[in-house]
Image (spheres, rainbow, N blue to C red):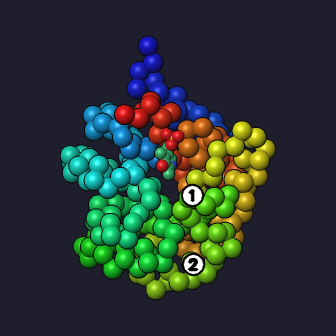
């Protein structure tokens, strides 16, 4: 039987192997365990193996989990779509927001981040495949968006996030990931160190292309409830 501990070790090994294959000098890769629609007990279990960063998509669900697991001092990342009437809750609960794609959302998060908390880490979500159904801003709008974020001292811009459409053609996938890496590399700013890219099905390709954070759900937790 494959235990949760085996799955965790095996996944960490695959991430390490993909990281070791890259050009020297590349940043390390952080595993973000995407725990949406997974029970609290499984999160507690992976935390026990040493996993620190967890990602959630739904605020109400996340609020209950974060409260229940507060003594473990985990790092919580919001990776879902954020509506502007939910920004206050997000700004209080999370350490990171990966899906900032509108100035209105950025402004509200900045204004609503509690004063006694550290600045909120954010990534700009990029819609690289120009999919209408998805959030994210167009690649050519990224530089202007970054300039406008300078007005928001309660936000700490850490990098870019993308969720490209799944590709059956790995060469096509590689090219899309490479475009995101080039865009990421073109930005020179303090603390801009995160390319959040790659999920269960494609994280090795994403790491090869230069991802620094992979968001993995099912490959770690199994199917979602
Ligand atoms: C659910 C989700 C993931 C994890 O996907 P898996 O295929 O389960 O690894 C990653 N990123 C985002 C934005 C998600 O919503």
Q: Visible in this render: residue 171?
A: yes
Spot occupied by residue 221 in the image (x, y as percentages of width and height):
42, 33
Give the position of the C terminus as an image quadrant: top left
Spot occupied by residue 158 in the image (x, y as percentages of width and height):
51, 66
Q: Nearer the viewer, residue 123 or 168?
A: 168
Near mark 2 (Cα within 10 A), the count class, few <14, some 14-19 or many ≥20, is some
Q: Residue at horizontal 57%, vertical 83%?
A: 147
Residue 194, which numbered label?
none
Query: Where 156 sits versus 18, above or below?
Result: below
Q: Is residue 69 left or right of residue 6?
A: left
Near mark 1 (Cα within 10 A), the count class, few <14, some 14-19 or many ≥20, is few
Residue marked by disc 2: 145
Q: Residue at horizontal 48%, vertical 62%?
A: 99
Q: Residue at horizontal 20%, vertical 46%?
A: 68
Q: Nearer the viewer, residue 74 or 106?
A: 106
- Is label 2's Cβ within 8 Å of ligand 1? no
Q: Secondary structure at mark 2?
A: helix
């Amino acid at each position: 039987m494959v235990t949760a501990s085996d799955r965790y070790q095996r996944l960490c090994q695959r991430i390490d192997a993909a990281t070791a294959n890259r050009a020297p000098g590349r940043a390390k890769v952080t595993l973000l365990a995407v725990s949406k629609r997974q029970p609290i007990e499984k999160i507690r279990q992976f935390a026990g193996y040493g996993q620190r960063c967890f990602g959630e998509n739904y605020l109400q669900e996340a609020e209950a989990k974060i409260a229940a697991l507060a003594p473990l001092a985990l790092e919580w990342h919001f990776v879902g779509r954020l509506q502007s009437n939910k920004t206050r809750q997000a700004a209080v609960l999370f350490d990171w927001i990966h899906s900032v794609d509108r100035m209105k959302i950025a402004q509200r998060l900045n204004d609503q981040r509690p004063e006694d908390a550290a600045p909120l880490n954010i990534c700009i979500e990029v819609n690289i495949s120009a999919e209408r159904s998805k959030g994210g801003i167009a690649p050519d709008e990224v530089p202007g968006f970054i300039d406008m974020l300078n007005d928001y001292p309660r936000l700490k811009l850490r990098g870019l996030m993308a969720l490209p459409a799944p590709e059956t053609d790995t060469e096509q996938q590689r090219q899309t990931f490479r475009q995101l890496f080039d865009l990421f590399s073109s930005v020179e700013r303090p603390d801009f160190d995160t390319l959040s890219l790659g999920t269960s099905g494609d994280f090795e390709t994403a790491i090869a292309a230069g991802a620094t954070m992979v968001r993995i759900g099912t490959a770690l937790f199994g199917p979602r409830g």
